[in-house]
Image (cartoon, rainbow, N blue to C red):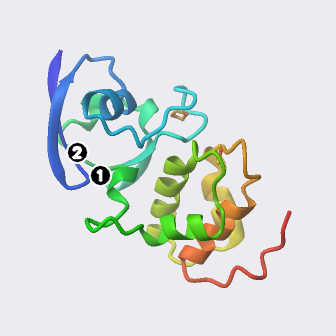
Amino acid sequence: MATISMTVNGTPMSGEAEGRTLLSSFLRETLELTGTHVGCDTGQCGACTVHVNGKSVKSCNMLAMEADGAEVSTIEGQAGDDGNLSALQAAFQEHHGLQCGFCTPGMIMAAASLLEANPKPSEADVRKHLSGNLCRCTGYHNIVKAIMAASGQDVGAIAAE
Ligand code: FES
Ligand code: FES
């Protein structure tokens, strides 16, 4: 076991981890930040997406020790300190971008990195960026709509599937 330290959502945190401990497990089980979901544990579904040093990563694809000393952002850091939802979270709520909600933390973290790099993405940009995030419920349409709405774009023209 080794002590792993990282700054998570602006707060320094540390805990013990084995060399094989995945970042997703470290966040959920050691730091008790269970907003990051684990769907497949094999890098395919994107439910575990977080940001490490500003980059979107699938946290089941990374060892906790690889994030030692890093700045990590998780879904818990999206809402403001006052509890108000972020623009993305509010748009997911308003445009029904979720049903069971299992994929939602990963979708929002992936979308946040898209909007940081591309503040006005096209529908095709959004769909391409989300290709590594799977949703078994929504058919993706309202997720795409929510992300485009969060970017301040008119989503009335996005046709229903
Ligand atoms: Fe990490 Fe599915 S749990 S990609
Ligand atoms: Fe259920 Fe996406 S809302 S998996």
In the rendered image, the quadrant that contains the C terminus is bottom right
Question: Which residue is at a point 78% across and 75% down the rendered structure image?
Answer: 158
- Residue at label 1? 53
The number of discs equals 2
Foreground: 149 or 58?
149
Is label 2's Cβ within 8 Å of ligand 1? no
Are discs 2 and 1 less than 8 Å apart at CB?
Answer: yes
Q: Secondary structure at mark 1?
A: loop
**Spatial separation of the CA atoms under disc 2 and disc 1:** 6 Å
Kind of element beneath mark 2: loop
Residue 64 is situated, as x and y percent measured from the top left of the image, at 29, 30
Reading the image, the residue beneath label 2 is 70
Which is nearer the N-term, disc 2 or disc 1?
1
Report crowding for label 1: few under 14, some 14 to 19, many 20 or more residues within 10 A (C-alpha): some
User: Which residue: 63% across, 54% down?
Assistant: 98
Q: Residue, x 56% and y 31% (percent of image)?
A: 39
Image location of residue 123, percent across then percent down: 70, 70
119 versus 10 height, above or below:
below
The three-letter code of the residue at mark 2 reads Ala
Could you tell whether 111 is left or right of 63 in the image?
right
